[in-house]
Amino acid sequence: MAKTIMVVDDEEDNRITCKAILEKEGYNVVTAVDGDDCLRQLKKVKPALILMDIMMPGTPVKEVVAKIKDIKIVYCSVVRTSEAEKEELLGKNIIGFIQKPYDIKDIVAKVRQYSK
């Protein structure tokens, strides 16, 4: 059975691109337009992994993440994040980072690694 991945990003192009890449690899993909939409959808679906943009309008991502239990989250960001900053952000269910714009091989490899 294919694993479900949730892509949370306020940029439609990023959601479409990421969804297309992951569906081609055999994943089921659900998308959310922001953190609040993510929380609403989590009432209906439990993904193996959430790919979440760090900077989105609406409820701050940090508050959204605090409400998500037992689901691994990978932050996606266009902002270059230093190793020290990454270490500071990692915790509980934040397990990694993916740099945008997406590199197809990188995103596929990281989703495989993190969704095990």
Image: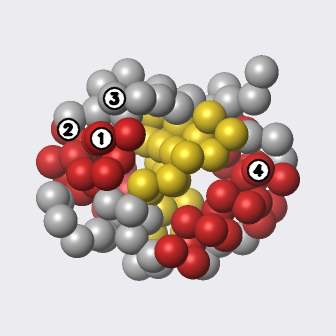
Classify 99 as above or below 24.
Answer: below
Instruction: Answer whether labels 3 and 1 touch (C-beta < 8 Å).
Output: yes
Q: Amino acid at mark 4?
A: Glu
Give the Cα separation between the discs numbered 3 and 1: 6 Å
Q: Which mark is residue 66?
A: 2
Which residue is disc 1 drawn over? 40
Q: Which mark is residue 43?
A: 3
Q: Position of residue 99 (x, y in %)?
A: 55, 69
Left or right? Give the position of 87 relative to 22. left
Query: Of 80 and 40, which appears nearest the observer?
Result: 40
Answer few, some or many: residues within 10 Å of disc 3's Cα (few below 14, many 20 plus, some between 14 and 19).
Answer: few
- Of callouts 2 and 1, the N-terminal one: 1
Give the Cα separation between the discs numbered 1 and 4: 22 Å
Quarter containing the C terminus: top right
**Toward which corner of the image does residue 8 lie, by quadrant?**
bottom left
Give the Cα separation between the discs numbered 3 and 4: 22 Å
Q: Amino acid at mark 1?
A: Arg
Left or right? Give the position of 42 relative to 2. left
- Dot 4 falls on a residue whose secondary structure is helix
Give the Cα separation between the discs numbered 2 and 4: 28 Å
Q: Mark 2 against mark 1, which lies toward the viewer?
A: 1
